[in-house]
Amino acid sequence: MLTVKKIFKKTKIRNGTLFAKLLFTVLSFAVMTLLSYIFLRSTIHDQIRTNTNAILDFQQEKVERNIEEHKLPVEIYSNMIRDIIISGGNADDVREFIDRESYYLQNSNVHKDCFGGLFGYFETLPGGAILISSEELDIPSNFNPLNHSWYTEAVAFKNNIAQTVPYPGLFNNESAVIYSHAIFNEKNELLGVFCMRTKREALGKDIIETTLAQGGNGVLFSENYICLAHYNPEYTGLHISEIPSDMVLFEEDLKSGNEIHEQEMTNYKGEQCLIFFRTLSNGWHFCVLIPKASYYQSLTSATFFLIAIGTILASVLCLVIVRIEIARTKSETESKQKSAFLSIMSHEIRTPINAIVGMTEIGKTAKEPTRKDYCFTRIEDASRYLQGVISDILDMSKIEANKLELSEIDFDFKQELTKITELIRFSADDKRQTFSVAIDENIPPVLIGDSQRISQVITNLLSNAVKFTPDKGKINLSAKNISQSDNKCKIQVTVKDNGIGISPEQQGKLFQSFHQAESSTTRRFGGTGLGLAISKGIVEAMKGEIHIESELGEGASFIFTVELNISECKELDSAAEQKPDINGIFKDRQILLAEDVEINREIVGALLETTLVKIDNAETGLQALNLFSENPDKYNLIFMDINMPEMDGYEATKKIRALNIPEAKTIPIIAMTANVFKEDIDKCLEAGMDGHVGKPLNMDDVLDKMRVFML
Ligand code: ADP
C-alpha cells in the first residue's frame, strides 16, 4: 500500500488538489454515514420501543390474570358462605365448607403453589362472632378484626375484593397477600368477611422469569411501593427506598402518575440499565429493568456495520481517486516529455539541415576544389549526424513496439571493443582526456550475439562519458566475464568517468525515453535523450541489466551486463568480418517499388543497382495495385511507401491482400516509409505488411529484408 507521502510524491501534487479531493470524499462519507446512522438509529429505536412495549403488555396481562385467578375463588366462596349463613347454617357448617374448599384449592393445579389457606370472621353466626380458619390458629385474647386491613378494607370495598400488601403474618410470621371479601345480607347488614391467603414468594415469580428470558429483570411493587417480587429475592418485602439502587428516584414520578419509560438508572449491581414502569389495574407497579448494552445491542451492531461499510467505501473511492490522479499526472508528464522531445528533435534535426543547406550554397559558388571538398565533408558530417538522430528514433520505436530483432552471429568481443575504442579515442584526444581500457582475459575469444547492438550500447556510453567529462578528465572502459556455465557467459561492461556526474533524483529517470538530466544539458551538449533508453532496451533484450552509480560533480559509472552464448569456434575467420558481396545477388529478381517521390525512387534504384534487381515503379498506391493484379507472379517483393496520392500504402496493401489470387496472400510487402514510430510500424503490420524499413534508408536494413524475403 502506498503511503500518503509517497502518493503525493508520485503524483507530484503540490497545490493540495488531491488532498482536497480525498478530504472531501472522506468527509462526504462521514456525513453520509452519520445521516444514515441517525436515520437508522431512530428506526431501530422505534422498533426496540415497540418490542419492549409488547413485552410489557404481555407481562402486565400476565400479572393481572394472576391476580384475577386469586380473586375468583374468593368471590365464589364468599357467596356460597353467605347462602349457608342466610339458610340458618352454623359455625360448623361454615368450617366444614372452608375445610373442604381449602383442601380442594391445595390440590388444584392453578393454586397449589401459592395457596396459603382460607379463613373468615363471621359476626352473626349462632353462638356469636367467630374466626374460622382452614389452618390451626392460635387466636389472641384481644383479637379485634378492626385492627386488620383485610377486614377494614373488605368492609370499605363493599362488593369488591380487597387485597392487602404482603401481610407480616396474621397470627403467625408467614408473610402473605390476603384477598378478602365482605358478606352482606339483603338488608345490607354485615354478616362477616371471607379471605384467602396467597404466599408472597409465588407472586410475580413468572414475571421475573419471563422477563429474564427477554434479557431484562422484573420487579413488582404494591401500591405502597413495597417490593412484592424482585429478581434478587433478598429485596422482596422492602420498601422501594430500602432497595440499594436508583429506583427510588422514580417514586415521586410514579406518585404523580408520570409515565416512566426508557429512563436511565443504575441497578443494585452498578450496571447501567433502562427502566420501564407500568401501573396495574389493582394499583400495583410492575417494572422491567433492561441492561443498556443489551437494549441497544442492535443499534451498536448497526453502528459498527455502517462505520465499516462507510470506511470500506470511502477507502475504495480514495484509492480510485488516487489511481486516476496518478494516471492523469503520468499522462500529463508524458505529454510534457513528448513536447519537450519534439522541441529537442526539431533542434537536433534543424541544426544539421542548416549545415547541409548552408554548405551546399557555399559549395555551389566556391571556385577552388579544396573549398568544395571542405563543403562536401561538412555536408557528409551533418548528414551522418542527421542519420544518427533518425536511427535513434527508429531504434526507440522498435524497442517500444517490442520489435527489436537481434542477430545471432559469431563475433570476437575483444576485437569489437578495439574497434570502438579506436573511434572514441579520437574524440577523447580532442579533449585531452585520459582513456584507459581493461579487458578480462577470461572472456571467451568468440561469442555469439548481436555485436552491432552491443557496440551501439558501449559507443553510446563512451560518447556520453567523453561529452559529459571536462577536458583532461579520465575515462575508463572495463569488461569482465562475471559468470560462465556450459556454453553461456555473462559479460559485465563498465564505463566510468570523472565528469559532471548525475544527481540521485535524475538517475532513476535517465533510462526513460526522451529524458535528459536537465533541460540545460541539451543547450550545452546537444543530444536527443534517447541513447540510454535505447541502451536499456538492447541490454534487456540480451537478458541483461543496466544501472548507474554516480554523484553530482563526482563522475559517473554506467554498468551493464549481457548474456551471450559461447561459440565452439576458437578463432574468427577474418574474412567473415568483411561485408558480404552484394554484386548481382538479386539477378533475375523483380521488385515493385511504390513511391511517389521521384528522388526517392532514383536513390533506391541507384543503391540497388549492383544487386542487379529489376525494379518496376509505381507512383501511387493505386498504380501499385494495378501493376500487381495484372502480373501477380512477376514480383518477388513490394516496397510500399505509406503517404502517396490517390491511394495510400495501407489501403493499397489491404486491397492487394484482398485480391482473389494466390500470390496476393504470399507476396512479401515491406513498408518503406518515413513514418517510424511504434504506432506506424504497428499500423503497417495490421494492414497486412510483412516488415518495415525506415527513411532515410539504411542500405544494410534494406538488403537484410530483401535477403530474408527474396533469397
Ligand atoms: P543524449 O546524450 O543524447 O542526450 P542519453 O540518453 O545518452 O541521451 O543521455 C541522457 C542524459 O543522461 C544526458 O542528456 C545527460 O544529462 C545524462 N548523462 C548520460 N551520460 C552521462 C555521463 N557520463 N555523465 C553525466 N551525465 C550523463
Image: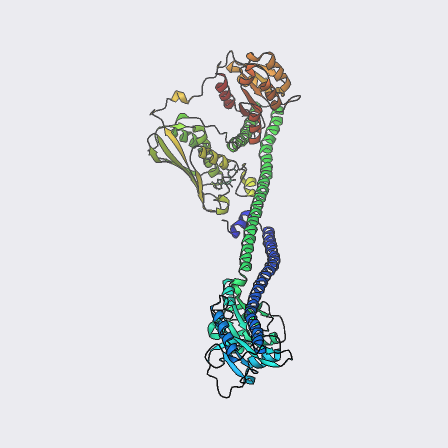
Q: Which is nearer the eye, 260 or 554? A: 260
The part of the image, by quadrant, that contains residue 659 is top right
Residue 104 higher or lower than 158, as above or below: above
User: Does residue 388 appear to the left or right of 644 in the view shown?
Assistant: left
| Residue drawn at 46 percent across, 83 percent down | 138
| x, y percent for residue 288 | 54, 68
| x, y percent for residue 192 | 57, 80
| Residue drawn at 50 percent across, 36 percent down | 533
Check the image and name the residue furthest to the bottom.
142
Residue 263 higher or lower than 707, as above or below: below
Residue 431 in sight from this viewpoint? no
Residue 38 higher or lower than 625, as above or below: below
Residue 221 in sight from this viewpoint? yes
Check the image and name the residue furthest to the right.
646
| x, y percent for residue 471 | 47, 41
The part of the image, by quadrant, that contains residue 523 is top right
| x, y percent for residue 124 | 57, 83
Residue 414 higher or lower than 119, as above or below: above
